[in-house]
Amino acid sequence: MKFSTVNKRFYPVWLPEVANEPTADSFHVIHDQNVGYGVITKRSFRKGELMAVFNGIILPHQTLYTLQVEPGMYIEDPWRIGRVL
């Protein structure tokens, strides 16, 4: 199933595409030598609007770029949204 992000996708081609994943027209990863990587938005979002969803790899342990789904289950997104946390 395709959702609309031809050539604007941040994720590797082997990772299944999901609705509302972050794209290059909405987000940009920046790097600062003093504080490291971060994500900035390239457009305005309305109050209450869904900005993006996590997409990534399911892991049994926490990393710097994970969000806990349930005990012992984490989704890792080192490409974009995982850098927001």
Image (cartoon, grey):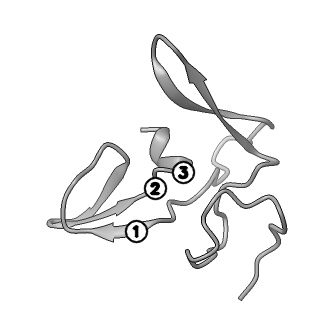
What residue does disc 3 label?
Answer: 79
* Amino acid found under the numbered disc labelled 2: Asp
Q: State which quarter of the image contains the N terminus.
A: bottom right
Residue 40 is tagged as: none
* Amino acid found under the numbered disc labelled 1: Ile
Residue 57 is tagged as: 1
Label 3–label 2 contact, CB within 8 A: yes
Q: Residue 32 falls in which quadrant of the image?
A: top right
Question: In the image shown, does 53 or 15 lie closer to the viewer?
Answer: 15
Mark 2, secondary structure of its residue: loop
What residue does disc 2 label?
Answer: 77
Residue 59 in the figure: left or right of residue 19: left
Q: State which quarter of the image contains the C terminus.
A: top left
Give the image location of residue 22, x and y in percent.
Answer: 66, 55
Mark 3, secondary structure of its residue: loop
* Amino acid found under the numbered disc labelled 3: Trp
